[in-house]
Image (cartoon, rainbow, N blue to C red):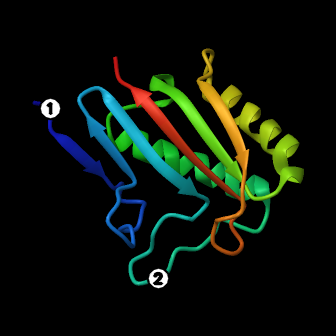
Amino acid sequence: MTEKTALTPKTHTTPPARFSHGVRKGNILQVAGQVGFLPAEPGKPPTPAGPTLREQTLQTLANVEAVLREGGAGWDDVMMIRVYLTDTDHFAEMNEIYDAYFDEQGLTQPPAARTTVYVGLPAGLLVEIDALAVLG
């Protein structure tokens, strides 16, 4: 039986409840919803990357990537990305940021993606992203 491994990169704080930033079991890695918090600083609460959608989306993608790397994966291993926005007006801008980011990463085979608009993030946070990777 393959062991399940919880993942918390050094750049992330310990989750406030019983969940992990990511979990790997065998060749499957699930990255839990990440938000645009800057890398963790001991003794300080999490801090958003900034007030703009661009700042938060780029930091959120960096946080997803940190969990992927911690689990031995990269963007090429990602099969599915789910994006959660707090405002429908952010949809077009997020798509531009997302497309440019993955162009810069050299990702030629984009993962399946789904974007949902919901309200449920802590005050000031605009975007959350999770990912499912299958390592080959």
Residue placed furthest toward the left:
1
Q: Amino acid at mark 1?
A: Thr
- Residue at 58%, 74% (x, y): give it: 47
User: On the image, numbered disc 2 is attached to which residue?
Assistant: 44
**Element at badge 2?**
loop
- Relative to 34, 22 lies left or right: left
Provide residue 101's location: percent of width, then percent of height. 69, 36
Query: Does residue 72 appear left or right of residue 31 in this picture?
Result: left
Closer to the camera in the image, 1 or 66: 1
Q: Which mark is residue 92?
A: none
| The residue positioned farthest toward the bottom in the image shown | 43
Query: Mark 1 against mark 2, which lies toward the viewer?
Result: 1
**Residue that carries the numbered disc 1 in the rendered image:** 2
Whichever of callouts 1 and 2 sits on the residue coming sooner in the sequence is 1
The residue at the point 82 percent across, 37 percent down is 96
Left or right of residue 12: residue 93: right
Q: Is the C terminus in the top left, top right, bottom left or bottom right quadrant?
A: top left
Q: Position of residue 60 (x, y in %)?
A: 60, 52
Amino acid marked by disc 2: Lys
Q: Position of residue 121 (x, y in %)?
A: 64, 66
Indicate whether 130 appears above or below 102.
below
